[in-house]
Amino acid sequence: MIPMLAAASNIKGDAVKKAGIIVGGAVVVGVGIYAYKKWKHKQDVQATTSKYGDGSKEGLAVQYASLLYSALHAGWFGATEDEKAIYATALKIHQNKIPLVTVSNAYRKMYKKELITELNRLLKPEELTTFNNALNGKYKPVKKPNILWSAAKATNPILSFF
């Protein structure tokens, strides 16, 4: 592309050579930054997962982060959430007195995603309330509406008062 620009605008060969050096240098720096970020992420994951199963708060946080990730991305192609597993993990976090910040940090280091953002994106408001209640030790399952009763209310407005 650069040689065509040089030929089209009558630029001497020395300018094309300098432009090539600049573009080549930018590519080398970009590849270096990309390689460093990949290496750093791999080191973070190794450091985080090395604590898995050691019984410490960080080890439990890593375990709960991986449980939450698999529960949030369950089903075919990660398209659904396993709410019961999410609530069970939240109860375990509460029972072992692990701060959610520690679990969130482990989640971020392993998956490069924010746990709170994922929860807000994938769970409905009622499910988020249930998750927060489970974190506080006050687990109450989400009630699923009775389809027949909902249909009856839709067809007969008087039933909506009950």
Image (cartoon, rainbow, N blue to C red):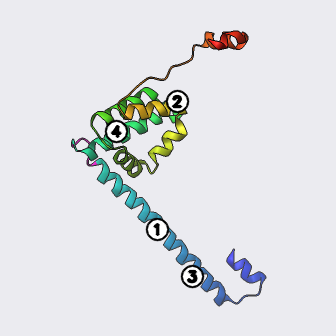
Q: Which label lies toward us, 3 or 1?
A: 1
SS at mark 4 in the image: helix
Describe residue 135's horizontal placement relative to residue 56 as left or right: right
SS under mark 2? helix
Q: Which residue is mark 1?
A: 33
Image coordinates of residue 149 in percent, x first then y, are 62, 10
Which residue position is annotated with label 2? 126
Q: Nearer the viewer, mark 4 or mark 3?
A: 4
Q: Give neighbour class at mark 3: few <14, some 14-19, many 20+ (Cα, 10 Å).
A: few
- Disc 3 marks which residue? 21
Front position among marks 2 and 4: 2
Badge 4 or badge 3: first in the primary sequence: 3
Query: Which three-letter amino acid code belongs to the residue tagged 3?
Result: Ile
Gap between marks 2 and 4 measured at Cα: 22 Å
- Pointer 4: what residue? 64
Q: Residue furthest front?
A: 161
In which quadrant of the rendered image does the C terminus lie?
top right
What is the distance, in whole Å, between disc 3 and disc 1 at their CAs?
A: 18 Å
User: What amino acid is at disc 1?
Assistant: Ile
